[in-house]
């Protein structure tokens, strides 16, 4: 089995989900760094979408067949199917599994774009024309979505069945962006949830892991 994860120079981009899951599973992997915000023409020869994460895995159990896929949610599900036979991070029970799917898809399709807009406008575009208003508009949208996460976390440490799963891995990274620009302070339950996810050694390692010097871009 050999696994290569294309990541960015930032520790907190969506590739953090894939690295975090691999750390949780104790599966070995290597990374290649793509310099986002720079010229990614070279990288687009490898992954025409030009985004991270990009996962390349050769699976000896399957005759060395290689899979090369984008989309952090899809990669988490693929890793669960291939490397988490015990169902540590994706419950076997069908109802809990369905709830994990729900939160995973809600995070990557609905929450990510909103939080990415808040983060980009407060971090990368800070001080630029229109950035503050754009961030405020996205914060209003996030407030409406956050109600449902807060309610799922009422009395629970994790999103589904009070057990850590890939749903928490997906959402934990989205919330990391919010924490970095001070948005979570308005949501004590989300802040506490993010705090205990961030205390997991696997995530601490991923977020402290500065990108190796080599670049695929
Ligand atoms: N839906 C995709 C989004 C991937 C994505 O937008 N990644 C960002 C980093 S977090 C990126 O590569 N941005 C560079 C670009 O858009 O050119 C996923 O979940 O993997």
Image (cartoon, rainbow, N blue to C red):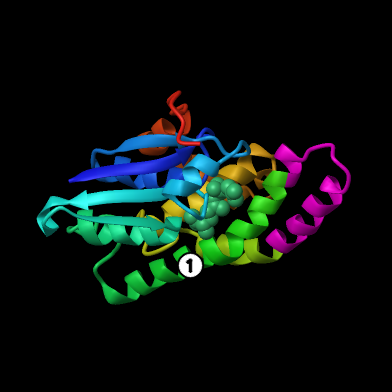
Residue at the (28%, 38%) spot, across then down: 29
Q: Majority secondary structure of the magenta segment?
A: helix
Residue 10, visible in the rendered structure? yes
Q: Position of residue 92 (x, y in %)?
A: 24, 68
Query: In this picture, which residue range is highlighted in magenta?
Result: 121-143
Q: Nearer the viewer, residue 50 or 84?
A: 50
Q: Position of residue 197 (x, y in %)?
A: 45, 43
What residue is disc 1 on?
A: 105
Q: Position of residue 79 (x, y in %)?
A: 29, 55
Per the image, is 138 magenta?
Answer: yes
Residue neighbourhood size for the residue with mark 1, other residues' Cα within 10 Å, grouped as few (<14), some (14–19), many (≥20) = some
In the depicted structure, whether residue 168 falls above or below residue 103:
above
Compared across the picture, whether 127 is left or right of 60 comes to right
Task: Residue 3: name its quadrant.
Answer: top left
Q: Nearer the viewer, residue 29 or 146?
A: 29
Compared across the picture, whether 180 is left or right of 195 comes to right
């Amino acid at each position: 089995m050999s696994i290569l994860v294309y990541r960015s120079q930032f520790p907190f981009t969506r590739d953090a989900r894939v690295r975090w899951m691999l750390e949780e599973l104790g599966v070995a992997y290597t990374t290649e760094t793509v310099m986002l915000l720079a010229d990614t023409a070279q990288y687009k020869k490898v992954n025409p979408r030009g985004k991270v994460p990009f996962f390349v895995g050769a699976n000896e159990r399957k005759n060395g067949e290689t899979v090369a896929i984008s989309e952090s949610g899809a990669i988490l599900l693929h890793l669960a199917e291939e490397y988490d036979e015990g169902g540590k991070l994706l419950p076997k029970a069908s109802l809990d599994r369905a709830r994990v799917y729900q939160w995973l898809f809600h995070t990557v399709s609905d929450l990510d774009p909103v939080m990415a807009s808040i983060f980009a406008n407060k971090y990368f575009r800070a001080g630029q024309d229109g950035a503050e208003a754009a961030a405020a508009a996205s914060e209003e949208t996030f407030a409406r979505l956050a109600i449902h996460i807060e309610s799922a976390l009422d009395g629970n440490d994790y999103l589904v069945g009070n057990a850590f799963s890939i749903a928490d891995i997906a959402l934990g990274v989205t919330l990391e962006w919010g924490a970095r620009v001070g948005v979570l302070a308005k949501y004590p339950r989300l802040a506490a949830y993010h705090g205990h996810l961030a205390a997991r050694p696997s995530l601490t390692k991923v977020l402290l892991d500065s990108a190796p010097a080599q670049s695929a871009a």
